[in-house]
Image (cartoon, coloured by chain):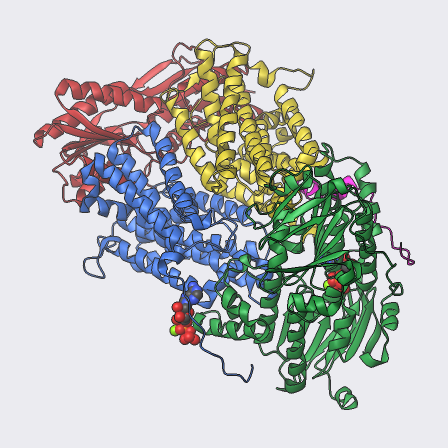
Chain colours: A green, B blue, C yellow, D red
Amino acid sequence: MTAERSNASPLLEAAGIEKSYGATRVLRGVNFRLQRGEIHALLGGNGAGKSTLIRIVTGLASADAGRIALRSARDEGKPPVIAVVHQELALLPELTVAENIGIVHAPSAFGLARRGRGRAVAAEALRLIDPAMAERVLDLPARRLSLHEGQVVEIARALSIGAEILLLDEPTANLTAGETEKLFVLLRRLAREKAIGIVFVSHRMKEIRALCDTCSILRDGRTVVDAAPMMALSDADIVSHMGQPAHRAADSRERTQGAGDPAKTLRLDGPDDTSLDIRPGTILGLAGAPSGPSALIAMLVGARSASPWRLSGEGIAAPFRSPREAIRAGVGFVPGDRAGKGILAQLPILDNVVAARRVRGSRGLARAAEREECAGLVSALQLKAGSIWDLPGTLSGGNQQKLLVARWLDLPLRMVVLEEPTRGVDIGTKRDIYALIRRMADAGAIVVWWSTENGELLELCDAIFAFDTDGTPKGYLAGERFDEDGLAELTGMAA
Amino acid sequence: MTSSPSPAVRSRAPSLLQSYRTEIAIAAAIVALLLAVGFFVPSALSMGNMRNIAQAAAPLVIMALGVFLVVVTGGIDLSVGSVFSLTGMVTALAMANGYGSVSASLAGLCVGLAFGAINGFLVTVVRLAPFVVTLITFAVAGSLAFIVTNGRSMPIADPNFWLLNSGELVPGLPNHLLFCLVAMVAIEFLLRKVVVGRWLYAVGTSAGAARLIGIPVQRVKFSAYVASGLLSSFAGVMTVSYILNAEATAGSSLMLQAIAAVVIGGASLFGGTGTAIGAVLGALMITCIQNGVNLIGVNSFWQGSVTGIAILLAVLIDRFGNSGRA
Amino acid sequence: MTSSPSPAVRSRAPSLLQSYRTEIAIAAAIVALLLAVGFFVPSALSMGNMRNIAQAAAPLVIMALGVFLVVVTGGIDLSVGSVFSLTGMVTALAMANGYGSVSASLAGLCVGLAFGAINGFLVTVVRLAPFVVTLITFAVAGSLAFIVTNGRSMPIADPNFWLLNSGELVPGLPNHLLFCLVAMVAIEFLLRKVVVGRWLYAVGTSAGAARLIGIPVQRVKFSAYVASGLLSSFAGVMTVSYILNAEATAGSSLMLQAIAAVVIGGASLFGGTGTAIGAVLGALMITCIQNGVNLIGVNSFWQGSVTGIAILLAVLIDRFGNSGRA
Amino acid sequence: GAAEKKTVAYIAPSLDISYWQWVGYGVKKQAEALGMDYVEYTSENSPAKQMDNARVAVTKGVDAIVIGPVSSTSTPPLLNYLQQENIPVAFAGIGPQPGLTNFTSAVTANNYETGKAQGKFTCDLAKERGGKEVGMLSLPQDRENAQKYLKGAEEAFAAEGCTLAQMLETRGLTVNEAVTQANDMLTAHPDIKAIYGMYDEAGTGAAKVLATRGLTGKVGVTVADGSPTTIGLLKQGAIQGIFFQEAVGQGIDGTQQVYNALTGAPVTQNLALVMPLVTADKVESPEAQKVIARVFPPND
Ligand SMILES: Nc1ncnc2c1ncn2[C@@H]1O[C@H](COP(=O)(O)OP(=O)(O)OP(=O)(O)O)[C@@H](O)[C@H]1O
Ligand SMILES: Nc1ncnc2c1ncn2[C@@H]1O[C@H](COP(=O)(O)OP(=O)(O)OP(=O)(O)O)[C@@H](O)[C@H]1O
Ligand SMILES: [Mg+2]
Ligand SMILES: [Mg+2]
């Protein structure tokens, strides 16, 4: 089977691709081949050049050198239809979800926008991944979607085109485990039945193993592994090809109920008489589909004042009316929607990183010392950038994520709220971020950490609070009761 | 895509009332304004005055529609007033040189076509900021309006030319009203039901995302500028056909009014929102305020203040009568 | 922390040449323009003409700085020209009523403070669109400028008032130049080195993200409008001190010029970009073009065209001389 | 030396109004006749811009200035500066601030007297048409000439027993605006029997509206200034009388005065030109044609 595929002419063949942005050489000779019917993992550390390669294949960026050949297997002589899910969402905020999907099916510029049909196509495509969501969001403007819903819509749109090549740049980063599983079933079927070629980018080793047949690895803009069968590579091999430190077992850490000052304990009251006390130093995981955790988080960080949740404790009198009040009270926040709510795109890395420190410290002047401060923070996270004066838009997705985490590092905080802080972060750095999260907790902060990867929560948290897919709180697991199946059952999704 | 037969999609199209909330609020504000003026000057509500308003509003309505098409893409067109003036001059000059009214009008429309294309070219190909580009063409077209006749105003001799504005292709409906209605309906239809129309919104709401999903962003923008140029030219021809006289300064107050109409009509200058009907209502509101101020006989020094306050009240009605957008 | 040594991220500030590429391109365009004019009219390069340019540019520079502060936050201020006129009228009226020049000037500045605060309030608290809000205050302030003196222009009798504009607090440097320099340096410093300045950019680049990192978005916006009002008032006081006469129409052409200066200076009307120096250079460029056109003696009908082409050339120099932004 | 060509600069308050263009034409023609060069500047209704223009003119080395000032009160610092630079100045259209003497000449129209005469004539038209309500389409009332016209007209109306039903001003001075204004005015005051147009476009707009409403001749129209368009309307009977203001003539006379000052010939400091009334029956007369030649440039 494998032999047969490699003999056929590939759907997509890129050879010797080079690309520079100014003085930065991003791709230095990348080779890549995609066969029909295969699911091909494209791997590499943050900033290795994966997204750049995808942009070049789809014609959004032009290569400085190299050759790209596209051959359709269905219709000789015509280029194959390509569908892409880009790493950052490409939704049209003021258009409805139905239109966002329907618009790519537009017949021609002056054809009628057949909304009825667009809507039907959209509904059908969404149902493949999340039938419940389909009904709810179809007529909402895309700006009202959560990041998670937006991601589902993007994937649905890509699938609905009926393309021969699917390029998926970290499509699962915003999905729950359940949705990921559904997507995988779908992708496998597409590859098998329709002989579609799929390129899959992810930093989650488990997913890659579960889905992909073939694997190519980029490292600093070069192909270091070219279309090797997945079987042939161990996890350790992959990590070392990516140029990342070998996987270290997490330092064993006793799960505590928080080591900090008990007088600073915070109390959380929620719907259905839910209530919990959180001691300083606790890492509290929030598990489950986003709707439940997001309402709680919005209250914690002062983004929304109307909420079924209430926070109380020493020094916290009333609900925060704004994020500013929350930050003043010592609550830090890494939002999940990094492009929309996290990054200040037109300000240099420097301002992005020290922004919270300026507010916390009531700084009046942008001092020169901030530069060293910023440089220190970004190197602690292995952030790959030329200079702290670069704009965040020039960073790769994972590096943008690191920038948001850097904002809150080493600040004396009472609580830090993290929405998927490792989203899109490469395998090596993920462990660094875990260590940093622990460091924050050890310094006496309460860490509230929402993640759709139950595995990482189980590994690091002192306690986990689970929500089901409807967003209702389902229960609290203290350290001793941790187990994957229990959590999966509570959240209503496979781990 | 899948084998399972798809169950019928429940079509929950929003009711007109929901889709056009802002527009309804503005319309209500206009009616309130008319009634308030009518309270002081009963003739404000006469048929004759409605005709006055329609006649005065027509060119602004047409121009606002053009500006709206550009604003929806996230651009701006400051050149419309100058293009309006230059078109009038060119049309009148052509007639003075013996051309018939049809070819003269076409020559006038070429002004809009040319300036629209220049605007579009500089914005999409040379990639200059729309504000700067259309400021430049505003200055150039405005200056050409003086140059073509050396500053003289041009009377129009063709005795039938007024028919373009005031004749009745549809009996009972003067042409200027007909043109406004047709332009409004056509553009609203284009924007809602035709693919390019949706593309205009797509480009304005996020040019980056639009590009990623394969919309020809630059071509869409270019078309918007051309349409805006053509519509202001059309307004120019329509106006000289009414006035039968072309002046180089004819459009000088119209640029700000047209943009204001679009913004009052609910569009954001950041692009991606608004409706053609809103722009039309915005233009109507501006005209009605001016009409009301004149009828009541507000001292001219106070007119600016009264107009300002009236616009403020209107947008407050929209803002608070319209909790959905709050 | 990890075994692989991470490549250091540079923290050295970029050189001035890099940070101010656009500004340098505009400055180059201005110099080119001056030399071109000087080629035809040698006196264009005389000290006397430099003084003319400085005197003519001063109010526009101050206003452009104010407008820039608003534009950086993603807003717009159309009211500056009217505030400028009204300030002059109020100041002159106060003096005519026997107030000293200091208290009269302060009364003038209160106009800017009040209108800036109204703009800021309507934008940040009532949440109306900046374009609509400042269009309203543009109309209201413009109308008040007529109302306060019933349309009469006001001569100023105080024989020493001119010192505010043309005296020399720093010997050898006329005050209008001093004020421009101080305002430019202070605002550029504010924007680069003061946290509030960085917040102005942050609010303009993404109000949502700015809010989440604890930036008081609405207060920052409010301050920008107040600053803009104050600066246009200051320009108004400075101008009447030069002309010793206040006119209700004095600022009517300044609004578009101030916004144009900001945009030519490299700022985007979508907010988040640009520099104070750029805005100042934009204002200088506009003034130099007008000066050049007058010196060469371009026929007044052609002035718009020549000005437009000159601006186009200038932005093209910026656009193509500056490949980094391409 | 004496052979060196002199330059005269014309500073207009704004050049988008034909009146000020025609003054410029007069300056230019007379400059040519006198062997002088001509340059023109516009002040965009801003006294600061006007001052800048004066300074640019000095930089450029002009020898004399003819100016239509933005306002009378804007003139003192300007005159001080030009006196210091020793440059003769003539005013056209609008005079300097009363009380000043440091200028060469002021060639103006007597707006107050014209207002009075036009007011009386307009009122007579109304009475002939069986009413006593008159309407007025005015220049912006922040202009001094507009205020003087209005004062004269109001006195005439009072004396002749007419009432000014409404006065409306336009900012842009375009026919289009005047049409809207005239429409609104007639809607609010249908009993108006005569309209006082303070400038050409006002009269043109009023005539247009009356034609549309079938009221041509039934409502009288008078206009000040005079232009080819209004003369045409006068001949058609759409306008009943024009009070000509000699725009070109003011330019010619102003230029002559500064030339006299440069050459040491005698000058007249105050030249207040009358604005003669011309009616349809007299428009072809030689006297009228002579006046018209000093109003606007020939159509060449
Ligand atoms: N417009 C740009 N200007 C300058 N540098 C850029 C630009 N776009 C990308 N880069 C650089 O190119 C490199 C590769 O980026 P790319 O987004 O392809 O990485 P990636 O492999 O997708 O990483 P990630 O896993 O974090 O998404 C990064 O170092 C990035 O900083
Ligand atoms: N703005 C809207 N949002 C959501 N639904 C809409 C909207 N406009 C129309 N619809 C609904 O979409 C359905 C079809 O609309 P439309 O007539 O525009 O499509 P169509 O061109 O007929 O497509 P087709 O013929 O392929 O079904 C209708 O049921 C209509 O109510
Ligand atoms: Mg990437
Ligand atoms: Mg249909």
The image quarter containing residue D193 is top left
Quadrant observed for ligand 2 in the rendered image? bottom left
Q: Position of residue C228 (x, y in %)?
A: 56, 31
Q: Is any atom of residue B88 visible in this view?
A: yes
The image quarter containing residue A491 is bottom right
Side (left or right) of D68 relative to B292: right
**Vertical order, C282 against D164 (above or below):** below
Give the tally of numbered discs: 0
Q: Position of residue C77 (x, y in %)?
A: 51, 37
**Vertical order, A64 against B205 (above or below):** below
Side (left or right) of A11 relative to D101: right
Magenta extent: C1-27
Viewer-side residue, A301 vs C303:
A301
Viewer-side residue, C15 vs B133:
C15
Does the magenta run of residues contain B295? no
Q: Give the residue drawn at x 75%, y 88%.
A: A5
Q: Position of residue B18 (x, y in %)?
A: 39, 57
| Quadrant occupied by the N terminus of chain A | bottom right
Does the magenta run of residues contain C13? yes
Side (left or right) of D236 relative to A481: left
**Vertical order, D266 against B3 (above or below):** above
Viewer-side residue, A155 vs A310:
A310
Q: Give the residue drawn at x 85%, y 67%.
A: A242
Q: Is any atom of residue C251 visible in this view?
A: no
| Quadrant occupied by the C terminus of chain A | bottom right
Q: Position of residue A494 (x, y in %)?
A: 68, 71
Q: Give the residue drawn at x 60%, y 67%.
A: A152
